[in-house]
Image: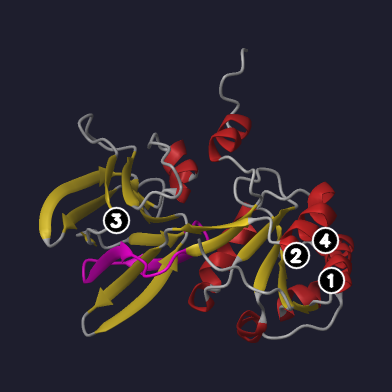
Amino acid sequence: MEKKPQIRRVGIVLRPSTPELKTLFYRVKQVFEAHGAEVLVDAISAGMIGVLGQAFEAMCRAADILVCIGGDGTLISLARRSYRFHKPILGINAGTLGFLADINPSEIEGFIEKLYRGEYRIDERMMIEAELVRGDESKTFYAFNDLVISRPSISKMVKVDAYIDNKWFNTYFGDGLIVSTPTGSTAYNLAAGGPVTFPLTDAFILTPICPHSLTQRPLVIPADFEIELKTPEKESLAIVDGQEQYDFTPDDRLLIRKAAIGARLIHRLERNYFDVLREKLSWGQMR
């Protein structure tokens, strides 16, 4: 079992453009300070609610844990941006879905008490490391949920050649291709007809988006394979977690592999993934 950190400094990030989170922020801050912790806030969140903050990287470096106040999108962004600091992340759900940020506002005081008693667990979720290679240059970035190759406009389609460990295995033609982590299986992958995968599995899920062939189906492969994508299309996009995008051209190679470390999410001991699925997806309910 992973050793749990002593919580002396807490770094907080708020959902952007939501100044009404100020009240919830002060509530979280007060509870942590009552346990003797120093509370840090990133500069953008701080500016939004009118308090003093510090640079995001400095906050991540100094904090023992990171706290996200927002929805799943805010947590996904935080996991990606803080990747190289490998700090545990606690999600407080001020959104609607709460697949990942699963501590509700009514549970804040009680759960932080449990944090300081060590009554919680840290789940490590697989992340994607992607390298976009163009000539002699390359750019590496990370994805928490998925990496999507998409058409640039509704009137166009995209063609993607896919290789596994340097061997061509498929060509996708349609609206795009999703390469998802198990955590991301309940996001765009699910909407596109891909399978739900247990989030602590090490696997890639390749799901075509509206393919122009009835034989194209989602594929699940072990995460120790390297995937390479190419496209002959002049205009394609590589979209990371639905939040960042890069041009993907015929001159590019996109190398996809399992990241060396995963995102570390703080959860209640009693949290059960299958209970979450049943609740969020309304499984087993009579209509």
Alpha-carbon span between mark 2 and mark 1: 8 Å
Q: Which residue is mark 2?
A: 116
Q: Mark 4 highlights which residue? A: 21
* Residue at the disc numbered 3: 223
Q: CA distance from mark 4 to mark 3?
A: 38 Å
Q: Residues within 10 Å of mark 2 (few under 14, many from 20)?
A: some
Which of pointers 4 and 3 indicates the residue nearer the eye?
3
> Quarter of the image holding residue 122?
bottom right
Nearer mark to the viewer, of 2 and 3: 2
Query: Does label 4 or label 3 sit earlier along the sequence?
Result: 4
Proximity of marks 4 and 3: CB atoms separated by less than 8 Å: no
* Residue 19 shown left or right of residue 70 in the figure: right
Amino acid of disc 1: His
Numbered range of the magenta stretch: 241-262
Q: Tell me which amino acid carries mark 2.
A: Tyr
- Residue sitting at the far left: 167
- Between marks 2 and 4, how big is the CA–CA gap? 24 Å
Q: Earlier in the sequence, mark 1 or mark 3?
A: 1
Mark 1, residue position: 35
Amino acid on which the number 4 mark rests in the picture: Leu
Camera-side residue of 119 and 158: 119
Neighbours of disc 1 within 10 Å: few (<14), some (14-19), many (20+): few
Residue visible at 65% across and 52% down in the picture: 101
Q: Amino acid at mark 3?
A: Ala
